[in-house]
Amino acid sequence: MRDPSSLPGKLAARILHIRPELMVIDKPAGLPLDPGRASGPSLADWLPLLQLGKRHLPHPAHRLDRDTAGCLVLGRTKPALAALNALFAARAVRKTYWAVTAGSPSGDAGVIDAPLRKVSTREAGWRMETHPEGQPARTAWRLLGTAAGPEGDLAWLELQPETGRTHQLRVHLAALGLPILGDPVYGTRAHPAGLHLLARAIALPAGPETGAALVCEAPVPPAMAPAFARCGAPTRTPGPSPVTKV
């Protein structure tokens, strides 16, 4: 079997953890999981390189939006992928996000309980909105730090979604009056560093098809580091996760 060191340097550095059943990669912001109508790279272009001697291509076990960076779990075998899909569907996987928001909350922690639905218009395209008739959606949040600035306060929040709706974190924070910095859809404007949303950590329970329990962390991307650092977030790269024989 091929070793991850055989990968191109930039891609090898994206592997946070790898073992026979699965891998966790640090997906960059701006990379969609699936090829789009417009030409451009997607995660699908990486999968043959990440196969690393396995019979089947690895496959994402959950979704991350194109503009969200951080931890993405891929199944490396069909049984492992099926088991991972079941864990995510059962909400047995603990997902932790970090965000920098435009504005600071009035409290230290809370839960946003607001159903979401998809709306679409010919002029503006589609987006998600809070609506009583939408699908249930809950997000727990905790304030980790703040910063004052000439353009307004910033806040560093830890987010733990209890459901996995499309754009859930972006819409919920906007509904709280705290749009994520750099969100041109649910916020006020774009940002040179893009959307400041990071899938910071993921915790998987042990399972017969997926192996030992695992906790992985993704580093703050360099483009987002200044805003996170202003709010007091550590922006150094976390220590390496355990890597087993692949």
Image (cartoon, rainbow, N blue to C red):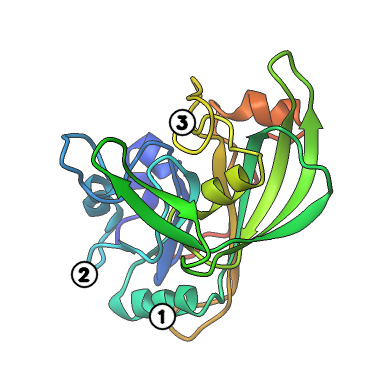
Rendering coords of residue 95 (x, y %): 58, 61
- Of 93 and 55, nearer the camera is 93
Mark 2 belongs to which amino acid?
Answer: Arg
178 vs 44: above or below: above
**SS assignment at label 3:** loop
Q: Are marks 2 and 3 in contact (CB under 8 Å)?
A: no
Q: Could you tell me the amino acid type at mark 3?
A: Pro
Would residue 72 be found to the left or right of residue 179 on screen? Answer: left
Question: Mark 2 and mark 1: span between their CA atoms?
Answer: 18 Å
Residue at which label 1 appears: 83
- Choose top left, top right, bottom left or bottom right for residue 74: bottom left
- CA gap between label 3 and label 1 equals 36 Å
| Front disc: 3 or 1 | 3
- Counting from the top left corner in percent of width and height, residue 182 is at 52, 29
Residue 55: mark in rendering: 2
Q: Which mark is residue 184?
A: 3
Q: Residue at x 53, y 25 (%)?
A: 223
Looking at marks 2 and 3 on the same chain, the residue that comes earlier in the sequence is marked by: 2
Locate residue 106: give its quadrant: top right
**In front: label 2 or label 3:** 3
Q: Position of residue 61 (x, y in %)?
A: 38, 66
What residue is rendered at 31% in x and 73% in y?
77
Amino acid of disc 1: Ala
Image coordinates of residue 130 in percent, x first then y, are 52, 55
Q: Disc 2 on helix, strand or loop?
A: loop
